[in-house]
Amino acid sequence: MIRDGGVLVQSPDDVIELLSGFDGTPRSTFREGAPAYAATEDFDDTPADIAGLLTTAPVPVDELIRQSGTSAAAVQLALLELEIAGRLTRHAGGRVSLTN
């Protein structure tokens, strides 16, 4: 929140001070000029074919992305579809496996 212009408030006086002269513009210029959303890659709405990379042994999602050679978004979409179908189990540490 501090990066987005948040300010530490410890008393009501701090709030009054901040509101006096407030004109609706952010106090912080940390992100000034940056677009609200900057895509670093084109979003592919086709899920990756990762079912063949999964077994009942948990594997890190990052490893699936590396092995599949597809975008992280496509792998996450495929994992979501498998999870909704009841074929995927999520484990601690960002690992996933096929459901037994």
Image (cartoon, rainbow, N blue to C red):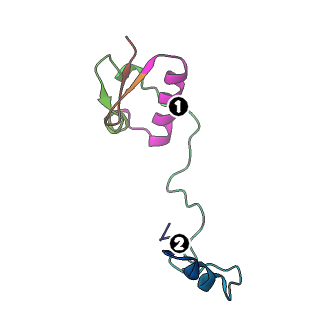
User: What residue does disc 2 label?
Assistant: 6
- Residue lying at 33% horizontally and 32% vertically, measured from the top left: 92
Q: Splitting the image into 4 quarters, where does residue 19 fall?
A: bottom right
Q: Which portion, as a residue range, is magenta?
A: 68-88
Query: Most extreme residue toward the bottom, as rendered?
Result: 21
User: What's the magenta bit mostly, secondary-structure-wise?
Assistant: helix
Separation (CA) of disc 1 from disc 2: 38 Å
Asked if labels 2 and 1 touch by Cβ distance under 8 angstroms, the answer is: no
Q: Is residue 21 above or below residue 25?
A: below
Q: Which residue is mark 1?
A: 47
Element type where label 1 sits in the image: loop
Amino acid type at mark 1:
Pro
Q: Is residue 35 magenta?
A: no
Nearest the camera: 19 or 88? 19
Please name whichever residue, 67 or 55, is drawn nearer the observer in this view of the structure: 55
Q: Is residue 86 magenta?
A: yes
Residue closer to the observer: 56 or 18: 18
